[in-house]
Image (cartoon, helix red, strand yellow):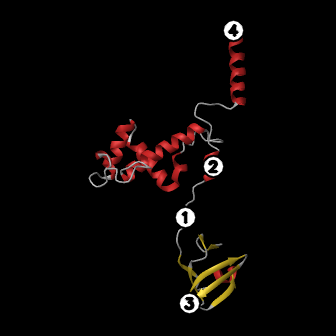
Amino acid sequence: MTAGGGSGLRPGDWVTFDDGEHQVVALAGTAVRLRSAAGTESVVLASYLMAAPDFAVTGAEPLPEMEPFGLLETLPEPARAAAVEWQRHVVEVETGLPPGAEPGTPARDEYDPATRSLTERMRAKAAELDVSLRTVEGKRSRYLKQGLWGLVDQRRRAGGRRRAGRMPGWWRRSAKCSTARRTSRPAPARG
């Protein structure tokens, strides 16, 4: 359910309604079950609740981002392997250790969060991989927002956008036909 400015109304949220604070206990169809701060429960229609002049969502947590697990299996193996490899590098930049490191393993000097800033660690990773700092920053940012899916090269995923430099078939045929007409016969002499 959506309230006012597009925020989702979910069980656990706190709302102001009918001159009191209420927690959303359950949603069923168009009905919302509320429990007041005093412990009294009531059921109201969502439309009635959200149209009330004093209605406001006062305590809502942002929706968690979910990784699209099913989509990862649809990727070609090289694209999935490249994303997993980038994950290893990004985790090392973030924590100082690659995923699966044995407990007690010390961080490499250039990735030690105790002695190096995040920017220094990203620069070290860029130098190690021979990529730009901007590439490492972008991969890290997308990983933090989208998880492993953010590291997938979107140009390589199934159904991705057409690569630059590729023409649709109809365009290629049209250009070929047009070129053939212009070059098959010399232009007549005018005179």
Q: First in sequence: mark 1 or mark 3?
A: 3
Marks 1/2 in contact by CB < 8 Å: the verdict is no
Q: Residues within 10 Å of mark 4 (few under 14, many from 20)?
A: few
Q: Secondary structure at mark 2?
A: helix
Q: CA distance from mark 1 to mark 3?
A: 28 Å
Q: First in sequence: mark 1 or mark 2?
A: 1
Q: Which residue is mark 3?
A: 20
Q: Which residue is mark 2?
A: 71
Q: Residues within 10 Å of mark 2 (few under 14, many from 20)?
A: few
State the residue lying farthest toward the left.
115
Asked if one can make out residue 52 in the rendered structure from this viewpoint, the answer is no
Give the x, y percent position of residue 85: 48, 42
Q: Amino acid at mark 2?
A: Leu
Rendered residue at 56%/39% (across/down)? 79
Rendered residue at 71%/11% (across/down)? 184
Q: First in sequence: mark 3 or mark 2?
A: 3
In terms of depth relative to the viewer, which is nearer, 42 or 176? 42
> Where 31 sits versus 106, above or below?
below
Q: Which quarter shows the C terminus?
A: top right
Q: Which quarter shows the N terminus?
A: bottom right
Rendered residue at 58%/34% (across/down)? 164
Q: Which mark is residue 186?
A: 4
**Left or right for 35, reference 116:** right
